[in-house]
Image (cartoon, rainbow, N blue to C red):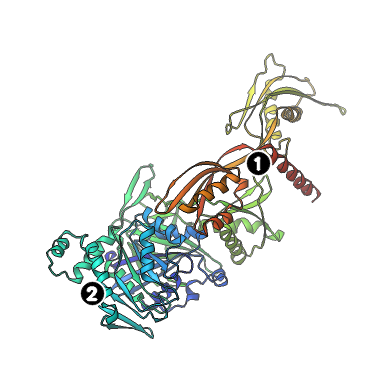
Amino acid sequence: MLAKDKRTVVLVGHNGSGKSTFMVSALNLGGIPVTKKEIDFDPIENQRGASINSHVGTFEFEGKQITLIDTPGFSDFIGEVIGSVFVSENVLSVVNATAGVEIQTERTWSLANEMEKPILVFVNQMDKERANFDDTLESLRERFEAKIIPIVYPIGKEADFRGIVDLITGKAYLYENGKTKESDVPADLKERVEEVKMSIMEDIVSLDETLMDKYFAEEPITPEELLSALRRGLVERQIVPVIAGSSEKNIGVDFLLRTIANIGASPLDAKPYKAKLDTGDEVEVPPSETDPFVGYTFKAVVDPFVGKLSFIKIISGSLKQGDGFSNVSKGTQEKIGHLYFAKGKDTYEVEEVSCGDIVVLPKLKESAVKDTVTHKDRRLTIISPEYPEPMISKSVTPKSKSDIDKISTGLSRLADSDPTFAWEFDPETAETVISGVGGMHLDVMVERLKNTFGVDVEVGKPKIAYRETVMGKAVSEHKHKKQSGGHGQYGHVKIEIEPTERGSGFEFVDKIVGGVIPRNFIPSVEKGIREAMKKGVLAAFPVVDVRVTLFDGSYHEVDSSDISFQIAAIQAFKKGMKEAKPVLLEPIMRVEVYTPDENAGDVMGDISSRRGRPMGMEPAGKGITVVRAEVPLAEMLDFQGRLSSITSGRGYFTMRFIRYDMVPPTAQEKIIAERKKYLEEQAEE
């Protein structure tokens, strides 16, 4: 199918808005019979009763190829949303008619605007108690700086909701037993429908100068002309069309699909993707049917039965079975055996894919989210959208020793499939630490580790990676002298320890003159000091930001050796550090909290109570304030739950490491005591 006849639509919105139910209804209308369990098919999704993955379905509807991407409504899985919005030409914001605009509505709307994507709105669940179309429209207009234009009006309320009026054509559609019947506008609605139609008419005609002239000249304007103006307005992001319906009762779903087919943006309407060449120069890659192949991996699934599945958006060119391409991000070559389109849980094979398609490729040698794949002669890398940094961490320990080798493989493959998930083995604490966007996110990753890779783990609270340094100067010496028959050991050093600028690291200064220590033993002294710095004198944390000057010492022509001077340096450093006012350092994070305006003061107060240093706040969109601060990592471990409580679930935050800073004396004493207890327990084991 030609690119102009393709539509990729990402479904976004708050959990419970009915995105997956809409996906099921749409696929069924497109001739692909599926159930909700075949959309949310992950066992964890079935257990939790909610989407935690994005799901893709491609089908044909009235001469157009439509690809829907259903995304999770929980903020912990925002990574799935970001990649899906990035590769879609249209964003469908699904809003619960009983709840109106919710936090994930706001966050995903913001994402769509940042990526300059056209937005449509589906006001869903109009058949539920307390559902109100007019109130939902008003809440949309209050929250978003956009021209919100309803193009339908509901027939009936709540349990009596049974159809919609097309405000463009004036036709009414009633739905019963899964069938759509064209009808006249109910008599009791005619006045209201005419009122709403008149209120949106000027907004629509303002999108086209010719229509504006006809409107003010009171000349007739055809529905086709209005649809043409609507398409232009949507593609150019000047308007947001709104449609009402119920995906559960299949009311309005066919109308919405027809609207997408008629006025939705095609791949050729999309803005060029930004990319970098091997030279580092930035270029633009416009969607094209004729340019050489370029694709972007926006989703990867680790399947226990078929291995890894890679979901790739075809930006330009085409692929046929048997073709090859380069994974520019990984530096590997791939040969394609089979090409598939997705339909929820299952796939169906196709012979060729081209610009605008989303293709599923199994068993690629190397593949991760954010990878760029291209024709072998087209060397460029698509610039990925920004993903939030993993900011909540937990330690994981395999319950079985036989799983120790498997855990790193499993975690690496999970990290390849999710840019918001990371893991590392911390040699300082001897812990494997996983990090993600939120607590639920990490819980799901632990479940996947068990379900997919057979690794069962114990989850604990990770230890903060503290550091030690000195605040003053001290001079110390140590003479290592040992005689045990034959050659003995002798090393003697005098050193000065002093602090350096925070973040500058370790500096070793050699001021030996007159050969009091031979040149070949100077590196031994530095090696010993570096070894001593691995465990400081307060709580056995690594030492940073110190300058050590070797200025004197002595040696023995026979008994001096490399190990003798290492030992002397280790002991001299320990003595000197104790006298140089040692202190603990803790990681400081730069935190940005997005909160409703009315909660900004409470959020700022909570951050201050966490030893945070407020850096200011400013508007971040309609009704939203961003609060910036610097806060110790140790104080942020339980912040997510507190923020949710303050903002009724509407707030979210990001954070990243910026530096180490001194721990206050009262907190330092507690940390040292806890560390001492931990080290004693480790020694007993």
Horizontal placement of 377 versus 511: left or right? Answer: left
Q: Residue furthest top?
A: 514
- Residue at 63% in and 46% down: 634
Q: Would residue 350 be visible to someone looking at this image?
A: no
Image mark for residue 311: none
* Label 1 Cα neighbours within 10 Å, binned few <14 / some 14-19 / many ≥20: many
Q: How many angstroms separate mark 1 from mark 2 (CA)?
A: 67 Å
Horizontal placement of 458 versus 205: left or right? Answer: right
Image position, residue 52 (x, y; %)? 51, 65
The residue closer to the viewer here, 548 or 649, is 649
- Residue at 24% in and 71% down: 168
Give the residue at mark 1.
466
Give the residue at mark 2.
169
Total marks placed: 2
The secondary element bearing badge 1 is classed as loop
In the displayed structure, 411 sits above or below 123; it is: above
Q: Residue furthest right?
A: 485
> Could you say which quadrant of the image residue 228 lies in?
bottom left
Amino acid beneath label 1: Tyr
Q: Contact (CB < 8 A) between labels 1 and 2?
A: no
Image position, residue 337 (x, y; %)? 43, 66
- Residue at 27% in and 65% down: 4
